[in-house]
Image (tube, rainbow, N blue to C red):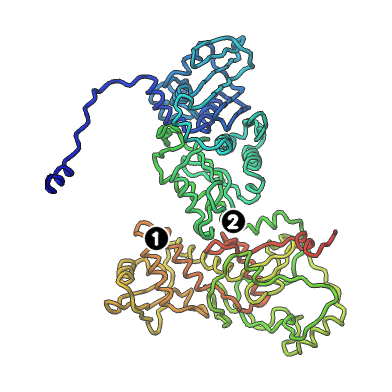
Amino acid sequence: MTDNTTASLAAAPAAAPARRPIRDLPDELISQIAAGEVVERPASVVRELVDNALDSGATQITVRLSAGGVRLITVEDDGCGIPQDELAVALRRHATSKITNLHDLETVATMGFRGEALAAIASVSETALLSRPASQGSAFLLDARSGELRPAARSTGTTVEVKELFFSTPARRKFLKTDATELAHCIESVRRHALARPDVGFAIWHEGKLVEQWRATFVPGQGDAQDALARRLSDVLGEDFVTQSVAVQHRVGPVTVTGRAGLPDAARSRPDHQYCYVNGRFVRDKVLTHAARSAYEDVLHGHKQPIYALYVEIDPARVDVNVHPTKIEVRFRDSREVHQAVRHAVENALAAPRAAALAAAAPATTATTATAPENFEPKQAPAPVWQAQAAIKFDEPQRGHRVQDLQALWGPRSTAAPDTATPAALGGLWAPSAQGPSDPAAPSSGAQPAAVAAAAIATPLPAAAPRPEAETPWPLGRAVAQLHGVYILAENAQGMVVVDMHAAHERIVYERLKAQVDSGARIASQPLLIPATFAATPQEVATAEESAEVLAMLGLEVVPFSPKTLAVRAVPTTLATASGFGDPVELARSVLAELAAHDATTVVQRARNEILGTMACHGAVRANRKLTLDEMNALLRQMETTDRSDQCNHGRPTWRQLTMKELDGLFLRGR
């Protein structure tokens, strides 16, 4: 055979398979195909059976498992029960009592409605139904495999027993994981139901041992539903979930959003503590997930995942739950209104400064005699006495915290160059104040440090003057010192507060810039005396031309100077008046890069905040700048009234509280 003949045979198409006639599938095969959509693993069976139990009005549900649910799944409830003559009908495909027409399907408010679960489960397992309604004298047991119906003993309610899951489809059974893994999925399935129904008690048994139990925390018509939900969240997810989260309560139009949103400090590396519910049904929906995530954009550090439990209540006619057989996906009629409602609900809950909670929880305490001005100008303070060069030895061992230890509380700090200059204004927030030391009792800076330190040790301290009672104590307390030009140390009713002054001021400037833009006014700009030019890439030139309007709104004027050069002609007045403001070219490059990274549909909403964050970082007070006590106190007061002041623009915390109990523990006091 020649080479040409071999090549032609290799290129010839394969013979078409013989055509098979079109025929109906057997009922058993139809059921098993349908079961493959509903029943993926034991947890799927648990979910469907608990759905039915909740729809029956149960107040107590018990789940019993063996071999992770592969050998045995039993779900018992105290609901309304199923009459004797309806037991056999309940096992038929598409048989249900929850909907009767198309209108019911479009406004479904029950957990189940498709009528597929029991039939699908029965087709891949040995299933038995035991039920008794209150109007029936005794219970009846139905064997799904044989169809045998006989009397049995049981109180009002229903028990569904599922044995040997996937015994009729061994290939499916091989795909199951270990018993421990399947058990974990079953527990998670019940946990999702428990988080939405604090009025129902749940118990999970495995191999005869109680592994989880959550008692009902709410009786309809009695007590507060939000308190009951908080107790259920604490029982199911742990007490830390409640203590490290804030309450969410928001209503706009037909959408109501409640629940709890975790603080940024409680974020996790995995999204395993994110629960979204629509009308009491746990769902996985991209609209809800994206809305919650976008609410954390300004306060979350890095790629951390927030924790939350959010409950969306909406008219059933405005949401379609008939999207997937597992009923875990939904489709909203107006996804934008739901997205905005969830985002604003979480944003509003996170906006309130947590420092206010300290004042609310703290007992009445004494106020400081120092007065914190509303506005101030940082000025060079006299050298403090703790900078004495002479070494002083103490008999008692000393304890100290290194700057690296404090920085570990906030994460990596900015590597911006130290700024020791005295600004005339920073971020448009600080105006000139009276010159002179903020503390008249401070020793003269001309005194010898060693002499001052020695006199402080040898001379007894005078008795402290009594302080007047405060009507409202300052949550972040009174500033007492500045540490290494980086941290502010303050004293409040609970103990000591440590503040990262750059991060805190960065947030204050950022929120002011956002408020100015949100009000519709453009950020005021100041022309540069000499425009700053720089060699630009083609993308930067194109972005500057396309985004001229957005740049003008942000107070920047960046125009082409030549085909390959851009000129910065104006910068925001907020930054131009700040001493130590960086290179305008660097600012322009950063803003253009962020504009290029987003399309036109999101630039005003999302990229705007990133641009303002970059501008705020340039305008915030830098490390190693000496502040007076009045300036420190004014910064603390502004933090207490600024939204989201607990985190900087990059999501790092701005302050930490050390309680007296924690401080006493460092020195073993009271032991």
User: Which labelled disc corresponds to residue 604?
Assistant: 1
For this view, does 134 lie left or right of residue 104?
A: right
* Other-residue count near label 1 (Cα within 10 Å), few / some / many at <14 / 14–19 / ≥20: some
| Residue 479 image point, x, y percent | 70, 70
Q: Quadrant of the N terminus?
A: top left
Image quadrant occupied by the C terminus: bottom right
Residue 6 or residue 632, whichever sits in front:
6
Res 200 → quadrant: top right
The relative height of residue 641 versus residue 163 in the rendered view (above or below) is below
Q: For the residue labelled by badge 1, is the local secondary structure a helix, a strand or a loop?
A: helix
Q: Which mark is residue 352?
A: 2
Q: Dot 2: what SS?
A: loop
Q: Which mark is residue 307?
A: none
Q: Earlier in the sequence, mark 2 or mark 1?
A: 2
> How many marks overall?
2
- The x, y position of residue 21, in whole percent, is 23, 23
Residue in the image at 72% along x and 65% along y: 496
Q: Is residue 308 above or below residue 403?
A: above
Residue at 42%, 58% in the rendered image:
605
Q: Which residue is outermost to the front?
A: 1
Which amino acid, by three-letter code, is at mark 1?
Val
Q: Position of residue 193 (x, y in %)?
A: 56, 34
Can residue 281 be seen here?
Answer: yes
- Tell me what residue is drawn at x 69 percent, y 82 percent: 437
